[in-house]
Amino acid sequence: MAKDKKQPRPKAETPKGFRDYFGADVSERKAMLDKIADVYHRYGFDPLESSAVETVQALGKFLPDVDRPNEGVFAWQEDSDSEKPGDWLALRYDLTAPLARVYAQHRNDLPTPYRRYAMGAVWRNEKPGPGRFRQFYQCDADTVGTPTVAADAEICAMLADVLEEVGIPRGDYIVRINNRKVLNGVMEVAGVLDPADPSKFEAERGIVLRAIDKLDRLGVDGVRALLGAGREDESGDFTKGAGLGPDQAETVMGFMDARRDSGAATCARLRDLVSGSVIGAEGVAELEEMASLLDAQGYGPDRIVIDPSVVRGLGYYTGPVFEAELTFEITDEKGRPRQFGSVAGGGRYDDLVKRFTGQAVPATGVSIGVDRLLAALRATNRIGGAPDGPVLVTVMDRDRMADYQAIVGDLRRAGLRAEAYLGNPKTFGNQLKYADKRGCPFAIIEGEDERARGVVMVKDLKLGAELAAGITSNEEWKEQRAQEEVPRADLVAYLKQRLT
């Protein structure tokens, strides 16, 4: 009789493109999201939590830009092996497409305009790379149901306030705005958009949008190559270009180089570029109105500027688009200085809800890349460092665990973070090693002698570590003052004073 084949043990490793988040990562992210939520709340936005799973039909094809439903997203088909397979489902790739479904489904019960913010994980089935993961967090705010560009201007102002609230000072960021209608006007002038047949040249326009969106990464020559025949990257991978002729490409490149010293001058240059295009002229007028509204609120060019190079890659944007860029320099993995770059973006997407209702529903919003923004705050030492662990109540006698838990209970009720050691207490040195690994600021010691006298020993672990580094003799060790006897009744007050 053949023996059953032994199953190999699974590998203890995260899937490719994913990562685990430990204590400090989670705590810092929560603290930052709380600050962002406070700003959104001040602006009158309400929170929304929607499902992490949507039907592929509801998500649409805006991320993959192809017909295959599982390209670019993590998708599966319900009951795929049955005679009547179910819907294709997918993990959400952003928080905007689910909002369109939510609004279409509940629009009769929601106010108009509907102002919501959402925070959570999204998933993209794309090639991972350094700092590029398949699961990451986003933090969005959107206004659905109003066509006025005052809503777009408000989102941009709120984005600037968010950056300053989390610790990015004025001068270290800029919010750049543009308008997709202007770009459509430019492409109409360049001959790759036919207003009478918008589906014509659709593939070419998609490539143009993605090419312009990569200006910061690829440079002028890289974008020009993508506008033409295509581009081969350093790994040898070839990306097909839009196939534009030299004159057509120059028209698009002129649009990208249209930024001037002032918003008014930039708009004047854009108006020249879209001359003869109705949609292009409409986009320039919207940019001028946004600039006026922002200026009236005190958001000048030191915080928000008109920049034609901003297009945003996703295909559902229909009007104003914007991006928040951090302008300070950091050092990359090869030691080269570079600007940190974009941490947030968004725009107007008036046709997204229409897919569900058949009626145009104007909407605008912004999405903040949470992990990118956290990385920026760490790079500038605005957050980071080892966080304090809990106060550790050591165990000198395992039969007295109730007494130690009573101490812990007193500390917790006073709002202090504390825990009793729950490992093997046989070796006291192991308890202190545990406290060191946890980053505990203090250890509480209560043996039989201390209990009889109504005191505890409070060991300042950080001070002890600092003093120990300079101690060279046993006499010096005995004289060091990192440990203090405190009346048991005064312990809470003592620690509160030391921990503030």
Image (cartoon, grey):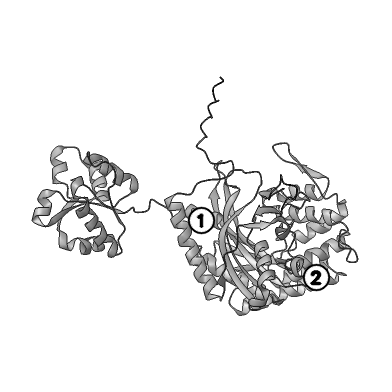
Judging from the image, what secondary structure is the residue with disc 1 in?
Answer: helix
Sequence-wise, which precedes: disc 2 or disc 1?
2
Q: Can you tell which of label 2 and label 1 is closer to the viewer?
A: 1
| Residue shown at 73% from the left, 36% from the top | 236
Q: Where residue 154 appears, x then y in whole percent?
A: 62, 74
Label 1 sits on residue: 374
Residues at marks 2 and 1, CA–CA distance in whole angstroms:
38 Å
Judging from the image, what secondary structure is the residue with disc 2 in?
Answer: helix
Q: Amino acid at mark 2?
A: Arg
| Residue shown at 12% from the left, 52% from the top | 450
The dot on residue 176 is none
**Left or right, 290 with reference to 194:** left
Q: Amino acid at mark 1?
A: Leu
Q: Where residue 454 appears, x then y in whole percent?
A: 11, 57
Q: Where residue 367 appears, x then y in whole percent?
A: 61, 62
The dot on residue 271 is 2
Residue found at the far front of this picture: 1
